[in-house]
């Protein structure tokens, strides 16, 4: 490597690390959900048949006023590991719709 290039490395390393950090953080933040759409998915996918129309009045666990991270919520929607709650792969409920559902149940 030429001496000139070698001297450039300390200048570009912080810039590169900052870029990496930005990409990492944007990938990890909770996606923005729309609670109004979330309400629509909640009834369209029949969540109410187990969790109740209000999220706390069904046979399944209370899902109203959720106290869990978005990532945990998404994992449960995709596969609750339960013989009762259905699995909802991305073809059924997209990532955006999961975010909407999360926003809806958080706001409830
Ligand atoms: C056929 C009934 C059924 C349907 C339909 C259903 N669920 Fe569930 N759900 C359950 C049961 C039962 C559990 C408890 C699973 C366990 O822990 O064994 C559960 C667990 C959950 C949990 C975790 C609650 C907690 O505090 O751990 C969330 C969140 C949830 N459901 C959301 C939804 C959403 C959103 C929908 C609609 C897309 C939905 N469920 C559809 C039965 C259902």
Image: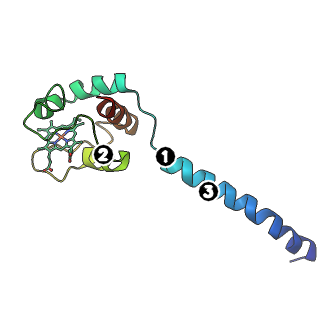
Mark earlier in primary sequence (2, 3): 3
Q: Residue at x 40, y 27 (%)?
A: 34
Question: Where in the figure is residue 105, as x and y percent of width and height?
Answer: 29, 33
**Residue 26 in the figure: left or right of residue 42:** right
Question: Where in the figure is residue 104, as x and y percent of width and height?
Answer: 32, 29
Q: Is there a contact, CB below 8 Å, between mark 2 and mark 3?
A: no
- Where's ligand 1: which quadrant? top left
Q: Secondary structure at mark 3?
A: helix
Q: Which mark is residue 71?
A: none
The answer as to whether callout 1 falls within 8 Å of ligand 1 is no
Q: How many marks?
A: 3
Whether residue 57 is situated above or below residue 95 in the rendered picture: above
Q: Is there a contact, CB below 8 Å, between mark 1 and mark 3?
A: no
Q: In which quadrant of the rendered view does residue 17 lie?
A: bottom right
Q: Secondary structure at mark 2?
A: helix
The quarter of the rendered structure image containing the N terminus is bottom right
Counting other residues with Cα less than 10 Å from the Cα at mark 1, is it few (<14), some (14-19), or many (20 or more)? few
- Calculate the distance from the C-alpha at mark 2 to the C-alpha at mark 3: 25 Å
Q: Which mark is residue 73?
A: 2
What residue sits right under mark 3 in the picture? 21
Counting other residues with Cα less than 10 Å from the Cα at mark 2, is it few (<14), some (14-19), or many (20 or more)? some
What residue sits right under mark 1 in the picture? 29
Q: Residue at x 11, y 34 (%)?
A: 50
Q: In which quadrant of the rendered view does residue 92 lie?
A: top left
Q: Nearer the viewer, residue 56 or 17?
A: 56
Q: In which quadrant of the rendered view does residue 14 lie?
A: bottom right
């Amino acid at each position: 490597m030429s001496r000139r290039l070698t001297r450039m490395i300390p200048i570009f390393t912080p810039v590169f690390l900052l870029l990496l950090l930005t990409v990492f953080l944007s990938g990890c933040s909770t996606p923005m959900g729309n609670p109004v759409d979330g309400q629509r998915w909640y009834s369209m996918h029949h969540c109410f048949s187990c969790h109740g129309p209000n999220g706390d009045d069904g046979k399944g666990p209370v899902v109203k006023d959720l106290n869990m991270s978005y990532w945990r919520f998404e994992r449960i929607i995709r596969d609750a590991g339960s013989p009762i709650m259905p699995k909802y792969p991305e073809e059924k409920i997209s990532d955006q719709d999961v975010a909407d559902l999360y926003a809806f149940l958080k706001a409830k």
